Image (cartoon, rainbow, N blue to C red):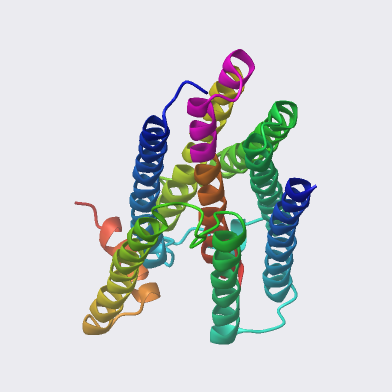
Amino acid sequence: MNDLTAEQIHEQNEHRATKTLGFWIYLMTDCILFASLFATYIVLRDGTYGGPSGKDIFDMPFVLAETLILLTSSFICGLVMLAAKHKQKIWAVVGLVVTLLLGAAFLALELFEFTKLAGEGYSWQASAFLSAFFTLVGTHGLHIAVGLLWVLVMLGQMLRRGLTAGVSRRLAMFGLYWHFLDIIWIFIFTIVYLMGVA
Amino acid sequence: MESQKRTSVEILRYGIGFVLAIALTLIAYFLVVNQVLTGAGLVGAIMGLAAVQLLVQLLFFLHFGSKQASDARWHQAAFYFMLIILIIIVGGSLWIMANMNYNMMMTPEQMNEYMMKESNKGF
């Protein structure tokens, strides 16, 4: 590191900032993807085709537990960012493992909910409401699954290479991604579940 | 010493965000489950709570608008542009579909019934 001239360090920082901005723009486009799914859901939520509406099938204490788990996961992930920033590798690894476990718990609960609904005959084929519901919530779940894979890759990189500039940058991007998914979930919780049973 | 102090301030920042987020989630949950409000008031209240939580998470978790990043302005520009597109997509869809139901003189429930009746005839 000491061999780098001031100019090279400046260039490196510039490079990092550009990549982070690129990732941020990806997140913004992902927001627009979710916006169209939310719009679809809101338009179709009364199209129950004689089947169940949200009121009949949502298990609210279960969904609250999911929400709190994801929120905690997002908070721990924030602490991982701090640990990485201050080069405390052990705490970063521990925090990342906790983030992984909480994320996996969330995904397991969601899959449990999906299989339970499908088992009762309320699958995505039953009505427009259920199609929109499974697409919106399922897309979020898919993002979570990708995030969990990402955590595994980051854990491997941190243990093998340590907190190098590249690893720290990818870790910071993962942090943005995970907080972003938590924000999307807050709106799923509010618009799909809370307004569904209200 | 100085850096240690800064670290605890940073941890505190995440902690405050976390506590606020939990509180906002629980308030919205109990408003709905205990049926404190009804109708449009309830929908307005929980959407308001979600919007406040968006702000809390943006500020405390994503450090939105902090001067740390050299190109924070570009992050903000992308965010506000996304917000405009989002409002057009969601607001526009709701507006068009509400208008369509109105012009067909049908409520969504009636539309539902109509479609069930039509599909029973067979294609």
Q: Between residues A126 and A41, which one lies in front from this camera angle?
A: A41
Q: Is residue A130 depicted above or below A19 in this figure? A: below
Numbered label tally: 0
Q: Residue furthest top?
A: A160
Q: Could you tell me if residue A121 is visible in this image? A: no
Q: Between residues A26 and B77, which one lies in front from this camera angle?
A: B77
The residue lying at 35 percent from left, 66 percent from top is B80
Q: Between residues B4 and A191, which one lies in front from this camera angle?
A: B4
Q: Which residues are magenta?
A: A157-174
Q: Quadrant of residue A112?
A: top right
Q: Residue B48: x percent and y percent?
A: 56, 77
Q: Is residue A193 depicted above or below A115 in this figure? A: below
Q: Quadrant of residue A104?
A: top right
Q: Residue A18: x percent and y percent?
A: 35, 42
The residue lying at 31 percent from left, 78 percent from top is B98
The residue lying at 58 percent from left, 72 percent from top is B52
Q: Could you tell me if residue A188 is visible in this image? A: yes
Q: Residue A71: x percent and y percent?
A: 67, 51
Left or right: A50, with B1 as reference point: left
Q: Residue A96: x percent and y percent?
A: 67, 32
Q: Residue furthest left?
A: B123
Q: Is residue A10 depicted above or below A162 in this figure? A: below
Q: Quadrant of residue B51?
A: bottom right
* The stretch drawn in magenta includes residue A123: no
* Main SS of residues in magenta: helix
